[in-house]
Image (cartoon, rainbow, N blue to C red):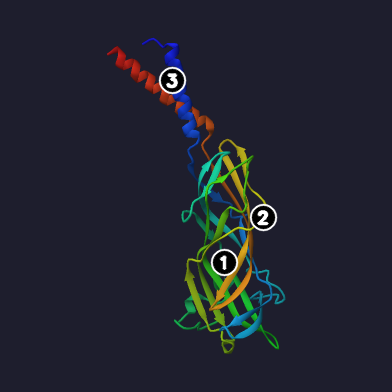
Amino acid sequence: MTLTSRHASAFAAIGALLLAATAAQAAPVSWTIDSTQSFVQLAIPQQSVQVNNTTSLTVRIRNQTGSASTWNAGNKAFMGGTIDTNYIDNGTIQFLAGQSNMLGLNSGNYRPDPASWNGTAYTNTAFAPAVFGSKVQAQVLVFLDAAFLSIANVFYELNSGVIPIAAGTFSGTAENFGLASASLEFDSVLSSLGLPDARASGPVGATQLNADGLWTIANLGGGNRKLTGALNLPLAIDLNGTIVNGQVTGLIVATATVPEPTTFVLLGGGAIAIALLRRRTARRR
C-alpha cells in the first residue's frame, strides 16, 4: 500500500476527531480528602426557640466539659474519605450525587452514650465517641443545663451539576453540601420543660452553598491535582421538634491523579497506527 496525500489527510482527520472526542469526554476521578486540613465547624448563637409550639425559651450551646462560657470543644470535626466526580482537566467538574464517601471523624467523647438508650430514655451519664458534642442550656430565670447532645456516624453529601472550570477556579456556590446521614443523641436533664430524651438517625439532605469565594484546582505536577473549597451554609438542628438554627463553615482539601493529555495523544496515535497496519496487511493478502 502506498501512502498518498489523500490517505495522509484522511488519517490526520481521523486522528483529530479521535483526540477531540477524547478530550471532551469527562472521566471518573476520585479525590482523596486530606483529613488533616478538611473540617466542618458548627456555630449556634444564643436564640429563642419554641418548645412544643407553646413555650418560648432562650437557649445557648456550651461545652459539655471544661469552660462553660463558650462552645469550642465538640463544635469542629475533621473530615476524611473520598469525593467522586466526573472531571475534565481545565474543563469541567461534576460532584456525583450519592457516590462519595465523606465521613466526619470523631472529635472526642461526649454524653450521651448510645449504648445506654433503653428505648425511651438514657439510663446513665456515660460518654461515647462522637463527631460533634455540646451541652444545651435554657434560661429559666437563669441559664440551667437542659440537655446533652452528641452527633455521631456522620456522612456528608456533596453534589452538583456540571460546573465549568476557568484558569483553575470554579464557582463556590454551584455545589450542594449537607448530611447524607447521621445519628443524633439528645439526653435531657430538664424534661419538665418539655424536652424529653430523644434520638434520631437517617438521611438529612444537602443545601446549596452560600457565596464564599471560588473553589480551586491546583496543578501539582504530572497528573496530580489539588482541590480546595470553602464551606458556608445554614444549619438547622431538630431537637425533638424544637428547631435550633446556626451556621456551618469548613474547608475541603483533596487530591487526585488525573490522566495526562499526552496519554490521550498516545492512545489516539496508537489507534491510528493499528488501523493502518491492519489495512496494509489486508491489502497484501
Disc 3 packing (10 Å; few <14; some 14–19; many ≥20):
some
Q: Are marks 3 and 1 in contact (CB under 8 Å)?
A: no
Judging from the image, what secondary structure is the residue with disc 1 in? loop
Mark-to-mark CA distance, 3 and 1: 58 Å
Circles 2 and 3: CB atoms closer than 8 Å: no
Q: Earlier in the sequence, mark 1 or mark 2?
A: 1
Q: Residues within 10 Å of mark 1 (few under 14, many from 20)?
A: many
Task: Give the class, few, some or many, for how many residues have Cα within 10 Å of label 2's Cα (few <14, many ≥20).
Answer: some
Residue assigned mark 1: 131
Q: Looking at the picture, which amino acid does disc 2 mark?
A: Asp
Q: Quadrant of the N terminus?
A: top left
Image coords of residue 7 (percent x, y): 42, 15
Q: Residue at x 65, y 49 (%)?
A: 214
Residue toward you, 28 or 94: 94
Foreground mark, 1 or 2? 2
Q: Which residue is mark 2?
A: 212
The disc, 2 or 3, on the residue closer to the chain's N-terminal end is 3
Q: How many marks?
A: 3
Kind of residue sitting beneath label 1: Val
Estimate the x, y position of residue 151 in percent, counting from the top left: 55, 70
Image side of residue 138 versus residue 125, left or right: right
Which mark is in front, 3 or 1? 3
Q: Is residue 12 above or below residue 157?
A: above
Give the numbered dot on residue 55: none
Q: Position of residue 95 (x, y in %)?
A: 52, 50
Q: Quadrant of residue 234?
A: bottom right
Q: Is residue 44 left or right of residue 224?
A: right
